[in-house]
Image (cartoon, helix red, strand yellow):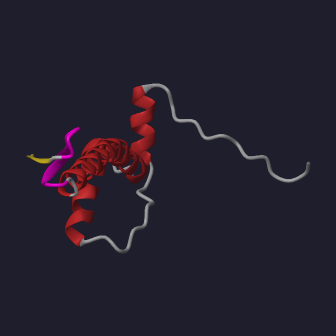
């Protein structure tokens, strides 16, 4: 097929080359609807830990944030289900004896 072939981008394997690569790149992520304080924190994180590479900083945040929060959300859903079951459980349970007598057992 004619046209341009896409080349796969690969990061340098050597740590020093990777640092140089990151340092030489300009920040290029545009986010306009972020509160100013959150944006400043994000920029500081990117500067201090990722040589101003916003993409790596964002990936790191997602990798750190999502699995932990998904686990927490799963636990919250489990707790909500348990609470619903407890709230919908009758306060007492009726037991009918062989003789037909009804005994109420309180929970």
- Magenta stretch contains residue 72: no
**Which residue occupies the foreground of this view, 76 or 33?**
76
Question: Is residue 41 or residue 83 the one in the foreground?
Answer: 83
Q: Is residue 21 left or right of residue 51?
A: right
Residue at position x 41%, y 57% in the image: 27
Task: State the image coordinates of residue 15 (x, y, percent, origin top left).
Answer: 40, 27
* Nearer the observer, 23 or 39: 39
- Considering depth in this image, is 96 or 12 the residue closer to the camera? 96
Q: Is residue 93 magenta?
A: yes
Query: What are the residue bounds of the magenta stretch?
Result: 90-100
Residue 19 is left or right of residue 46, and the answer is right
Q: Residue at coordinates 39% horizontally, 36% vertically from top-left?
A: 19
Instruction: Identify which residue is drawn at 43% across, 67% down.
Output: 30
Query: Which residue is at 46% across, 25% downward?
Result: 14
Residue 45 in the image: state x and y as whole percent.
25, 50
| Residue 1 image point, x, y percent | 91, 48
Locate residue 8: give its quadrant.
top right
Q: Residue furthest left?
A: 106
């Amino acid at each position: 097929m004619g046209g341009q072939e896409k080349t796969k981008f690969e990061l340098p394997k050597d740590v020093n080359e990777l640092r140089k690569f990151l340092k030489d790149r300009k920040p290029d992520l545009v986010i306009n609807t972020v509160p100013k304080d959150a944006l400043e924190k994000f920029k500081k994180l990117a500067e201090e830990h990722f040589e101003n590479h916003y993409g790596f900083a964002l990936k790191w945040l997602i990798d750190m944030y999502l699995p932990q929060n998904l686990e927490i959300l799963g636990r919250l859903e489990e707790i909500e289900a348990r609470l619903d079951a407890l709230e919908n459980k009758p306060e007492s349970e009726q037991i009918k004896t062989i003789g037909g007598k009804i005994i109420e057992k309180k929970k």
